[in-house]
Image: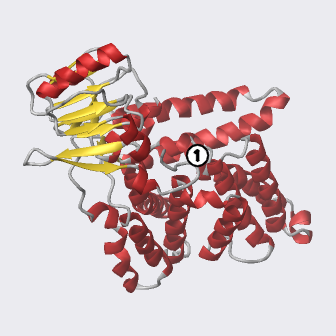
Amino acid sequence: QVEALRAAGLAHIISISGLHMAIVGGFVFGLLRLGVAGVPALALRLPGRKIAAGSGMIATLGYLVLSGAPDPALRAGVTACAAFAAILADRRAISLRTLAAAATIVLILRPEAVTQPGFQMSFAATAALVALAEAWPTPVREISAPLAVRLLQGALTALVAGVLISLAAGLATGPFALQHFNRVALYGLPANLVTEPVSTLLLMPALALGVLLTPLGLGDLPLEAAGLGIDALNAVARTFAGLPGAEQVVASAPPWALPVAFLGILFICLWRGPLRWLGLPLALAVNLAPRMPSPDLWVAHDAASAAVRVGDAAVFLRPDVRRFGAEVWARRRGLSMTEEAGPSGAGLVCSAHACQPGGGDLPVAVIWTRRPGVLLREFQAACAKADLIILRAERPEGPCATGVVLDDSDFRAGGAVELWRRPDGGWDALWAQPLRGLRPWSAPAP
């Protein structure tokens, strides 16, 4: 079900982040605001808006503690508290200044958050929504309009607002999702439009009422209503995830593309007037940047696992051994992960000790074993058939006609490697060590 939510672009609903904090804080704020305004004696003597804002801040902080304060919840909680603090200080609650203050507080608490996709995506989406709110025209309220006309106008305004909100948030977070997660949910916009009324008007209020009424023994009905909302969300997710091409795997852009896209999004959000759209080409840098050709072979940092490219798919040569690195590599290069073809689809014949060329177009041998006798036998067989030999152990003694042999010393010095076969039969290699730099925890072995 989680995969269905991701494919439909609805995974943010199950994350304790902005939506949950907004509904918890907003529910308490609206309840107390209405309660104070509904009693004339209190409304004339008490600052109802500030009381509601202070109570909303307390509820948000309490929910943050209850959730265990994971990074997404911390970012959303700080942002919500900054908005409530603006109300207490008689300032605008929704503004880019408030958002900047919240981002500064988060970075003071956890400076490393600036490198995390969640921080980048959440504040990019919020900045886009704040910019949309600032550009939204003030509605004109008709005098003595019939109720049916007002309901129709309100429904149309809510529909347009929902479309624009989902579109703005999706476009602002799109470059980060492409670069970090290599996934595109093609039906994310309609899926969010369908689920937004369910989550906002049914699910979250029902859960809030359930929490309040359960100590009194009256929480069964709200929680049953919340269960219906959850079933509806799951049904929508399965429906959209089952559509053709619901989720696409996209290769990562070059490293420079994401900072350029961030600057473009920032320019669009901060600038006023039509000139803000000059930042659109920069904001689309991740989408438009050219991708390098997908490698033919990937080998882990210890040569214990490897994967080869077959068309647009990645085939794991040892699918039972530490697949995470190979899965990350496949996504980064825009390759789908498959086990249908197996090593034979890549023209390789694999055993428990090695994969040897089997007459395909990829004359590569990957030898996992460290047992001296088996290693020597597999190595001699590979020297007769392969153009490239990957060894998990040190290279055995003896002549070998193969020009390129990578053994344990190479991987200890360079880390994981991607390999491209050139038209002339040679190989190009991209090692991980030069990319991650010389740091105490990543320095290569002597």
Q: Residue furthest front?
A: 398
> Mark 1 = which residue?
201
Q: Nearer the viewer, residue 101 or 240?
A: 101
* SS for callout 1: helix
Q: Is residue 291 left or right of residue 55?
A: left
Q: Pinpoint residue 304: horizontal percent, then vertical percent.
A: 39, 28
Mark 1 closeness class: few <14, some 14–19, many ≥20 residues within 10 Å: few
Q: Nearer the viewer, residue 162 or 10?
A: 10
Q: Pinpoint residue 25: horizontal percent, then vertical percent.
A: 72, 54
> Does residue 344 sit above or below 3 in this rendering?
above
> Total of numbered circles in the picture?
1
The answer, for residue 2, to whether it is visible in the render is yes
Q: Pinpoint residue 128: horizontal percent, then vertical percent.
A: 49, 67
Q: Amino acid at mark 1?
A: Leu
Q: Is residue 322 left or right of residue 28?
A: left
Q: Pinpoint residue 169: horizontal percent, then vertical percent.
A: 46, 60
Q: Is residue 186 left or right of residue 6?
A: left
Q: How is the image coloured?
A: secondary structure
